[in-house]
Image: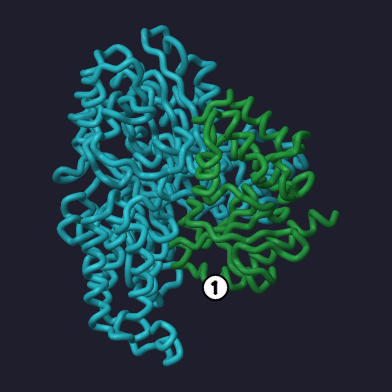
Chain colours: A cyan, B green
Amino acid sequence: MITVFVPRDSAATSVGADEVASAIAAEAKKQKKDVKIVRNGSRGMLYLEPLVEVATDKGRVAYGPVSAKDVPELFKAGFLEGKSHKLGHGLTEEIPYFKTQERLTFARCGITDPLSVEDYIAHGGFAGLKKALELPPIAIVNQVTTSGLRGRGGAGFPTGIKWKTVHDLTADQKYVACNADEGDSGTFADRMLMEGDPFCLIEGMTIAAVAGGATEGYIYIRSEYPDAVNVMREAIEIARKANWLGKNIQGSKYSFDLFVRKGAGAYICGEETSMLESIEGKRGIVRYKPPIPAIEGLFGKPTIINNVMSFAAVPIILDKGGEFYRDYGVGRSRGTLAFQLAGNVKRGGLVEKAFGITTRQLLEDWGGGTATGRPARAIQVGGPLGAYLPESKFDVPMDYEEFVKVDAMVGHGGLVVFDDTVDMANQARFAMEFCAIESCGKCTPCRIGSTRGVEVIDRIVAGVEREKNLALLEDLCVTMADGSLCAMGGLTPFPVLSSLRGFPEDFHKPPANKFLADAAE
Amino acid sequence: MAKKAARPSNSPGEGASPIPSPAEVAALAVCARHGNKASELLEIFHDLQHQLGYVPEATLPVIARALNLSRAEVYGVQTFYHDFRRHPAGKHVVKICRAEACQSMGTDKLCSHAERSLKTPLGGTTADGMFTIEQVFCLGNCALSPAVMVDERLYGKVDAKRFDEIVAAYSKDAAE
C-alpha cells in the first residue's frame, strides 16, 4: 500500500486538486497499484498547488504543480516510488521555502488528515488540552500571559489579559467566540488552518473555555469559505463523538460545546462587537465600547473573543509552556506569525516565521519577487485597512511596535504585493470605496466620510483644485481616524494616507482628460 | 446551488392570502427546524435561500411571527447582509473577487471581460438565466489571484481564457 497525499484545501482544489486526486485513483486502478489517497491540508506552498506527495521510506516526496493530465506521466516516471520527474521537488521537508520556516501553529497542517482524530493525536494534538485539564484555570491564563501572545486578528491586544478579565468574573454563563470572518484581502491563514487542521482550533477554544469558565462557544466563519464551514462542522461532530467536546471532556469536570455560525457577506462582521451582534442573529452593527466584550459580550455575558490564529497558537503554548513560545520573536512581539504572501508574487503562500523578519526578506527570499517579473512598487500589509509600504520601507522588521513607528501595522501578517504598474491614487480611492460599501452605518465619519473620500480623490485625480482637495483629504482622514467608532472607519485613512505620502507622484499626474475633470466638477 | 422558486412572490397581497404560499410554508418549516430562535435568524435565511434561491419578501412576516420579532427587525437583517437575495438569481452565481490581491493580478480586466462575455454588468443575470455575476471582496485565495467562485466552488489563477472555459463547462453541463 502506497499513501499519496492530495490536498483538499480550497486553494489547491481551486487549481484542480480534485481532478488530480480522481486521475491518480483512476490510473492506480488501471495499473492495479494499491494506492491510498489521503486528502490532507495544504503545506502552504500555494505556488506549487496542487502539491502531490508520496510517502516513501525516506519521507514524503513532493510533486507540483500537478495537473490531471500529468498523472499518467508521473506514474510512468515511477512517482509512487518517489522517483524523479520534472515536477518533482524531492523531500517536502527539504524544500527551502518550507524548511526555513518556524512552524508552531501550522506544525501539523498539510501533514495529517484534517478529519482524523488519531492522526491529530499522533502528531502531538490534544497534548495542550490534556495538560490544561489538569491545571487550575488561572495557571492556564498565566501560561498564555507568559507566552506574550497577542491578538493575531490585527489589533495585537495581549491575549492573556483578555482571558484574565473573563476568568476573574463570576457569571451564570460565559462564552468563547472565535472570529473566523477573515475578510481581509491577502489573508488565508485562518481558512488554511480550519480546512487543514480543524482540531487545533477546537483544542485552542476548549483550552480558552476551561481557563475562562465558559461552557459554550461559537465559531463565526464567513460564508465565502464554504469548505471551511463544512470541515469545521464535521470536525466538531467528530470531536463530540470522541468526547473532546461535550459533557465532562475526557472524564474531567469541564464541559464545553461548540457551534459554527456562518456569516453572510458583511466585512464589518470581522469587527468583534459587530460579530457578536451577527452571532445573535442581528444586523452586524458595531457596539459602543465600553463595556468591553470580555465583560459584556455575547448575549450580554462575559466572552473570550479571539481570532482563529490566536486560539490555534494556544495548544502548543500549553503543551510546551509559555516560555517556549516567548523565546521566538523580538521586542514585545513574541512567538511566530503566519505571514501570507499574496497578490503579485511569484511564490505565493503561507510562511510561518518568528517576528522580526522584514518585508523584503519575505518578498525576495520566499516570494521570489513579483509574478509579472516587474519591480515591486508597493506592498500592502495587514489587509484593506493596512498601509501601503513603498520600497523604502521594505526593511522595517515585522514587529507590532516598529510598524506603528512608520505609520503602518503588522495586522494579521497578510502581504499583498503590487508591481510598478499600480496606480496608487486608484488604490487610495478603492480603500474609501470599500469602506463606503462595507460600513455598518452607525457612525457618521465612516458612513459619510468614506463616500466623501471617494469624491475628493476623484477630484484630485481629475485635477480639480488639486492642492485644496489634497488638504481636504488629509483633513477628512483625521476626522475618520479620530471620530470613527471602530477600526473600519478608523483605519481606512491608513491605506489612503500611506498612498498619498509614499507615492505622491500618482496624485499629481496630468488629468486624463478635460471631460472627466468637468464631470468631477 | 441557487434554485428557481416555485413561483414568483412579488404578486401584491400574497402575504395576506389565507392559504400560505409554498414559500411561506417553507419559511415556517425552516424556522421550526431552528427551534424558532431569533438568534438563528442568519442560519434561517441561509437555509431558506438554499431551498428557494432567494428570500421572498412574503416570507418575512411569517419569519417575524415565528421568531417573535418585528417585521422591521427581520427586514433589517435581511437587507444588511450582502448574501441574502431579495430576487431570484441565475442558475449559477459567479462571484469575481475585486479585492486588493486580485487587483494586483488584473481583476479589473477580468471583470470587464466577464461583463463583455456574459453580456451583463456585475450584479446582473444573463438573458438565458444561466449566470448571475457579482463582485465579492476576497475569497481567501489571495496567493492564486485572480479568484472566482461559481456557486460554492472556488477557482484560482483565472484569466480571461480560463474564465470562458469555466463558464463553458457549466453551460455544457446544463445542456446535457
Image vertical order of residue B142 relative to residue A322, above or below = below
Image x and y of residue A208, in percent: 32, 25
Q: Is residue A223 left or right of residue A205?
A: right
Callout 1 amino acid: Lys
Q: Quadrant of the N terminus of chain A?
A: top right
Residue ID at (19%, 24%):
A142
Q: Is the residue A123 above or below the residue A81 in the image?
A: above
Which of these two is toward me, A25 or A13? A13
Give the quadrant of residue A438.
Answer: bottom left
What is the chain identity of the residue bearing mark 1? B
Q: Quadrant of the C terminus of chain A?
A: bottom left
- From the viewer's side, name the closer residue of A471 and A223: A471
Task: Classify mark 1: helix, strand or loop.
Answer: helix
The percent coordinates of residue A116 (x first, y second) are 53, 26
Residue A163 visible (yes or no): yes
Q: Position of residue A91 (x, y in %)?
A: 46, 45
Left of B7 or right of it: where is A300?
A: left
Query: Is residue A211 shown above or below A71?
Result: above
Question: Is residue A63 shown to the viewer in this render?
Answer: no
**Residue drawn 74% across and 43% down?**
A26
Camera-nearest residue between A14 and A69: A14
Image location (x, y in percent) of residue B10: 71, 51
Q: Nearer the viewer, residue A178 or B20?
A: B20
Query: Residue at image x 34%, y 90%?
Result: A510
Q: Please report the residue visible at 58 percent of the width from the left and 63 percent of the height from the top.
A: B158
Q: Which residue is mark 1?
A: B109
